Amino acid sequence: MQQTQTTSQSSPYAGEDRRAWERVPIAVFGRCMLASRLEIPCQAINISPGDLGVVAAHTPKINDQVIIY
């Protein structure tokens, strides 16, 4: 497992990166469907073998399920 510091270019989060896998910056546009069935545009900004960093205009509640396509 690799661990790296996330730069401001690949994540809006400015704190210490404690992820198990290195994130690779990407720019892929898609859509998110929230638990309320609200669909909004989103952008994947980084990816690793186990996670995906996404930015969108709406922030879901903690523990809400989100479908990204």
Image: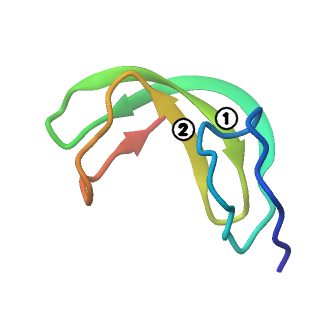
Q: Which residue is mark 2?
A: 54
Residue 9: where, in percent of width, then height?
77, 32
In the image, 65 versus 21, the foreground residue is 21
Tell me, yes or no, whether the two marked residues, 2 and 1, touch with CB atoms within 8 Å.
yes
In the image, 36 versus 55, the foreground residue is 55
Residue 64: where, in percent of width, then height?
24, 53
Q: Which residue is mark 1?
A: 45
Q: Is residue 22 above or below residue 60?
A: below
Residue 18 in which image quadrant: bottom right
| Residue 15 placement, left or right of 48 | left
In the image, 15 versus 32, the foreground residue is 15
Q: Is residue 56 above or below residue 1?
A: above
Q: Residue at x 48, y 34 (%)?
A: 69
| Residue 35 placement, left or right of 2 | left
Provide the secondary structure element on which disc 2 rests.
strand
Q: Amino acid at mark 2?
A: Val
Residue 19: where, in percent of width, then height?
67, 69
Residue 17: where, in percent of width, then height?
69, 62
Provide the secondary structure element on which disc 1 rests.
strand
Label 1 environment density (alpha carbons within 10 Å; few <14, some 14–19, many ≥20): many
Q: Residue at x 70, y 49 (%)?
A: 47
Residue sitting farthest toward the left? 36
Q: Amino acid at mark 1?
A: Ile
